[in-house]
Image (cartoon, helix red, strand yellow):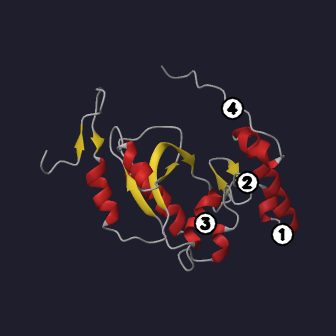
Amino acid sequence: IHRSVDDTPAGGGPGMVMKADVLARAIDATANDIRPRLLMSPRGRPLTQSRVVELAAGPGPLIVCGRFEGIDQRVIEARCLEEVSIGDYVLSGGEIAAMALIDACVRLLPGVMGKEASGAEESFSEGLLEYPQYTRPQVFEGRTIPEILTSGDHARVAAWRRAESESLTRSRRPDLWAIRQGQTPQKPPKDTTTG
């Protein structure tokens, strides 16, 4: 069909699939270079902070975004697209996932964050979730800043932050904690709270 970028799925079914020939031409028009070619896809390998660091240090990726049912498998294979997922859920298209990947990379570029140390103690930087943050006022609705954070004792503050990061990771992300402990992570339990 003239001027069409997608068509119905081969074998039937709902939705539309981006056509291989159209998408291949678009990818080819970007130039044949060394940039990683990524396809934002829920069936891809999970995006990790270590992969973000690699991408931010490189020439920048070429990012392909599918829509609805996705893209023809043949263009994934023919153009060596690496499928990347930002989580175990499905979006209408890859654009929001691409924005998340771009933001994660751009913030690591020199000069983007005010202080270079701003990115050093973030969640996942050491395989741990980030510790809780506080700021003024000292008391908010009866809740106070933990005394240790206002003590001026930098060693005790660092130890508290480390302990909080470990505690949060253990309780909220046992998969990350298992990896940190050198164990094989268990599959998370199935969410039975929805339909």
- In three-dimensional space, the C-alpha distance between marks 1 and 3, rounded to whole angstroms, equals 31 Å
Going 26% across and 53% down the picture, which residue do you hit?
22
x and y percentages locating residue 180 in the rendered image:
80, 49
Task: Decide: is 19 above or below 120.
Answer: above
**Element at badge 3?**
helix
Which is nearer the N-term, disc 1 or disc 3?
Answer: 3
- In three-dimensional space, the C-alpha distance between marks 4 and 1, rounded to whole angstroms, equals 38 Å
Q: What's the residue type where badge 4 is placed?
A: Lys
Asked if residue 152 shows in the view, the reply is yes
Q: What's the residue type where badge 1 is placed?
A: His
**Element at badge 2?**
loop
Which is nearer the N-term, disc 2 or disc 3?
Answer: 3
- In three-dimensional space, the C-alpha distance between marks 1 and 2, rounded to whole angstroms, equals 22 Å
Residue on which the image places disc 1 = 154
Residue on which the image places disc 4 = 187
Which is nearer the N-term, disc 4 or disc 3?
Answer: 3
x and y percentages locating residue 123 in the rendered image:
67, 56
Q: Nearer the viewer, residue 58 or 90?
A: 58
Residue on which the image places disc 2 = 127
x and y percentages locating residue 88 in the rendered image:
53, 38
Q: What's the residue type where badge 2 is placed?
A: Gly
